Amino acid sequence: MLKFNKWNLVWPEILMRSGLGRWLILRRQGYKLRFYNSALSRAIYLNQSVGVDDESVLEALLKSGDVYVDVGANIGSLGLKAWSIVGSAGSVICFEPHPRIYGYLRGNVELNTASNVTCHNFALSDHDGVASLDVPAGGRSDDMSNVGASRSDTGLSIRVSRLDDVLQDLSSIALLKIDTEGHELFVLRGAEGILSRVQHVFFESDLVSLARTGVRRDDVLTLLRDQGFLHFYLHYQDRGFVPVAPFLHIPFLNIVASREIL
């Protein structure tokens, strides 16, 4: 991690505003990223430990030859971490609806010459059609974009589809990761046909974001239980997987749902 001084905050702004940041390479364990004009690029530049906890989940659940699906892939950090684990025998499928961030995702995939990583520029939900991608004011909070119910005058008009339609030919998925700022339940409703072929689901559960879409945390857990996911965990690098139940009151959790005891 960088030793703090005022220039640590100034340089990211200079790099992003000038466009020169794309020539700066952020080296991670097993892959690399360009310093694009994005919130996640900036966070990683300032603190190399950003995302390491999530990467440890992938390290624990994926192996060579596996299939990993990333819904809400952002600039590709977790997708590329998965790629470094599953190797050439496996495959990674990424979905990122924000057009600009999708360009950064593609750029990072090309930077790593990750030929078995497939990228899609649309959102996932419980229906096919068009929706609004609402982006917070300021333009760079790309990690907070969320899918609305319909077209919006203020949001980006984007295509939405169902995982059941897009991934119907896949015979098995080792890990499905979903980070969609409160839209997770709708993604899962559009994947009920393929969930029987998924071994683990790794998803964000933020009570504030869920409430914005009229969803409770238990709605998501109930759908997964009905699909045969009976074990729910948090993951800590020093303790491994721990049951999620004692922590369910915490506003923000990253939860692993599994068909097996971990």
Image (spheres, rainbow, N blue to C red):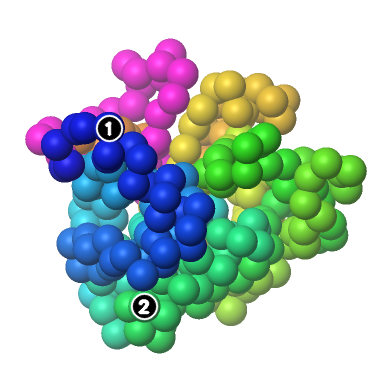
Measuring 48% from the left and 58% from the top, which residue is drawn there? Answer: 18
Amino acid residing under circle 1: Lys
**Left or right of 261 in this view: 206:** right
Q: Earlier in the sequence, mark 1 or mark 2?
A: 1
Q: Quadrant of residue 129?
A: bottom right
Measuring 89% from the left and 43% from the top, which residue is drawn there? Answer: 153
In this view, which residue lies farthest toward the top? 249
Name the spot of residue 126 as percent of width and height, x first.
74, 51
Distance from label 1 to label 2 (Cα)? 30 Å
Which region shows up in magenta? Answer: 237-262
**Mark 2 sits on what residue?**
111
Amino acid residing under circle 2: Leu
Of the two numbered discs 1 and 2 in the rendering, the one whose residue sits closer to the viewer: 1
Measuring 87% from the left and 43% from the top, which residue is drawn there? Answer: 152
**Mark 1 sits on what residue?**
6
Q: Residues within 10 Å of mark 1 (few under 14, many from 20)?
A: few
Name the spot of residue 180 as percent of width and height, x first.
58, 44
Name the spot of residue 162 as percent of width and height, x first.
70, 60
